[in-house]
Image (cartoon, grey):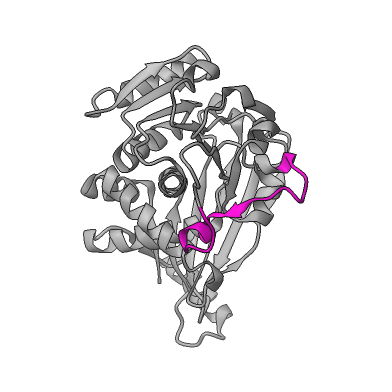
Amino acid sequence: MTTLLTTQDIARIVAAHGLPEVLRQLVAGIGAEFRRWPEFDKVPRLASHSRSGVIELMPVADATHYSFKYVNGHPANGLQGLPTVMAFGVLAEVATGRPLLLSELTLTTAMRTAATSVLAAQALARPGSRTMALIGNGAQSEFQALAFHHLVGIQTLRLFDTDPAATARLQRHLRDVPGLKTVVCASTAEAVQGADIVTTVTADKRNATILTPEMLAPGMHINGVGGDCPGKTELHPGVLEAARVFVEYEPQTRIEGDLQQMPAEFPVTELWRVLTGQAPGRRSDAEVTVFDSVGFALEDFAALRLMGALAAPLGLGQVIDLIPEMADPKNLYGELMRSDARRLRAA
């Protein structure tokens, strides 16, 4: 049997534990999986692009579990009352192929993306960072803001979005958070002034230059989240040239991240190598670092495992007949006829 976790189940998990604690556990869980990176069978995600967006499948597996995520990215969805990103995922047993968990991943993806950003910042940003510029104040922004406030210690957020209504909504959601100050700015250039960390999380599916070299300051850490498919970027190539660049999974980021603008020989470091001590992270207070984050299947693997573990003690999740359970596993036709007969009797 397979357990189904709905959006309501995920909301109840967050209500029971509090968002900061769920984010903390996601950071720990994702970090633990990254530290055993060589144990996983990894491939870049499979993408189907259209004029309006992209639909992707993101698989990964170790010797025990296999997971995949179905996810889209359609920037104009808001005009139709739909989220820009919608997702669900499956966690399965490698030994049998049996699906153990089917879960929503729209809400969970927002949390795991913020948790991954924090994981990278903990390794790469200057200790004592207290001010962050948040460029792009859409659906992901609250999660990034709260994750960096609670888990990194950010006290001041400098906000900019081309849509003032998005910034106003973000301010409303954050106004009662103790110890967090928000400052609305008129441009990206204004927002990054005095920022220890700059997070870019814009949604337009196009090559853009949200952050340019003249906006950089010594010691800045850039958390580039929005550039996550071919033809979509946020950082001017000069920003990458001025920094040390870190990525999740290099073969995928070279296709989808801001890294797509750079030559094949441009050097990058995969984050797992920093987390395991095989490569240095930040080398000085003056160094500029970039985390070119596109999202990787291992983060969803960790999130699925965590949400399943948090749901069980709360009695959450519905057991569903996703796969037939039969006395004779070879008798699929007989199972179909019995199921049809049961349906007719119920009618």
Kindly tell me whether residue 340 is visible in this rendering: yes
> How many numbered discs sit on the rendered protein?
0
Residue 44 or residue 56, whichever sits in front: 44
Which residue is at a point 56% across and 65% down the rendered structure image?
A: 60
Q: Is residue 103 left or right of residue 318?
A: right
Residue 156 point in image, percent of width and height:
34, 25
Q: Relative to 173, does residue 150 appear above or below in the rendering?
A: below
For residue 264: magenta? yes
Residue 248 or residue 206, whichever sits in front: 248
Residue 153 point in image, percent of width and height:
31, 37
Which residue is at a point 46% across and 27% down the rendered structure image?
A: 134
* Quadrant where the image shows the N terminus: bottom left
Residue 177 point in image, percent of width and height:
25, 29
Residue 146 or residue 325, whichever sits in front: 146
For residue 279: magenta? yes
Residue 264 or residue 55, whichever sits in front: 264
Q: Relative to 312, does residue 333 appear above or below in the rendering?
A: below
Q: Is residue 16 left or right of residue 87?
A: left
Which residue is at a point 51% across and 26% down the rendered structure image?
A: 136
Q: Is residue 141 left or right of residue 231?
A: left
Q: Relative to 198, does residue 109 appear above or below in the rendering?
A: below
Residue 33 point in image, percent of width and height:
45, 64
* Quadrant where the image shows the C terminus: bottom left
Kindly tell me whether residue 212 is visible in this rendering: no
Q: Relative to 159, does residue 301 appear above or below in the rendering?
A: below
**Residue extent of the magenta highlight:** 260-280
